[in-house]
Amino acid sequence: MTLLTVDALTMRFGGLVAVDALSFELDAGEVLGLIGPNGAGKTTVFNCLSGFLRPQGGEVLFDGRPVDRLEPYRICQLGMVRTFQIVKPFQAISVLDNVMVGALSREKSTAVAEKRSLEIIDFVGLAEWTYALAKGLPLPLRKRLELARALATRPRVLLLDEVMAGLNPTEVDELIALLQQIHRRGTAILLIEHVMRGVMALSERVIVLNHGVKIAEGLPRNVVQNREVIEAYLGKEFLRAQG
């Protein structure tokens, strides 16, 4: 079942076309990778999908409903939530309270929100820091906190913006395993990522953007062999590293 439909999405900033008539679909429970060089328009796509920007052309349908004119909190309440490339937790409050902010977007009862938040904190591996202030967390744990806060909103679609950036290889592997667990629970994921190991391990399909234009779409193993993708983004070094 198609959960997210993006049809001819277009966004301009002055004379710059950041996203140029982009179309794709995301099925329920699918993991779709969105890759491309810096400045390709990937985060702009996320900003349009999540309500932080209003596209100047095209349409975004979530579960058959137009959402491209809705406020971010309404899109979140419908079941599509995003993380941010630069993680910014509420630093002066605890890990638990940060996650409860997400839970309370969908739940009126603070007791229920707290119970759900504690379960998610344990699930993402932050139980030891439940009552610690968020400002004391190192980057890998702040990434997990950002993910936990998003999960607390009970998303059907999770938009992840470079969630692996800044992590070492061991931390990347641990995060891949966590995201695989989230996927197995039925959450669809749209993933912006430069860490190709993560893209290849998680994505069932991949879309490649360059200068706001989709230049390739398909299975990961096929997309990374595409000559235009290699020239625009991956480089021949990537293919050599793949053996």
Image (tube, grey):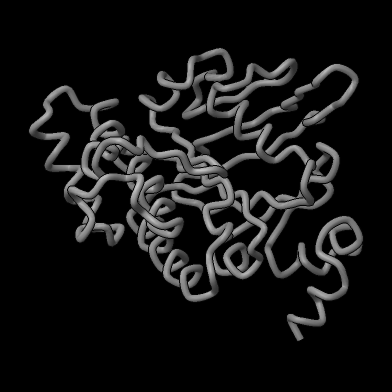
In the rendered image, residue 162, in percent from the top left (x then y), is placed at 58, 51
- Location of the C terminus (image quadrant): bottom right
From the viewer's side, name the closer residue of 112 and 227. Answer: 112
Extreme residue toward the bottom, this view:
243
Q: Residue at x 41, y 18 (%)?
A: 74
7 versus 117 height, above or below:
above
From the viewer's side, name the closer residue of 109 and 131. Answer: 131
Residue 92, by quadrant, is top left
Q: Residue at x 44, y 52 (%)?
A: 143
114 versus 198 height, above or below:
above
From the viewer's perspective, is 147 left or right of 55?
left
In the rendered image, residue 21, in percent from the top left (x then y), is placed at 79, 29
From the viewer's perspective, is 10 left or right of 229?
left
Extreme residue toward the left, this view:
111
In the rendered image, residue 7, in percent from the top left (x then y), is placed at 69, 28
175 versus 163 height, above or below:
below
In the rendered image, residue 169, in percent from the top left (x then y), is placed at 54, 74
Residue 98, by quadrant, is top left
Residue 43, by quadrant, is top right
Q: Residue at x 52, y 40 (%)?
A: 84
Instruction: Tally the marks.
Output: 0
From the viewer's perspective, is 241 left or right of 91?
right
From the viewer's side, name the closer residue of 121 and 182. Answer: 121
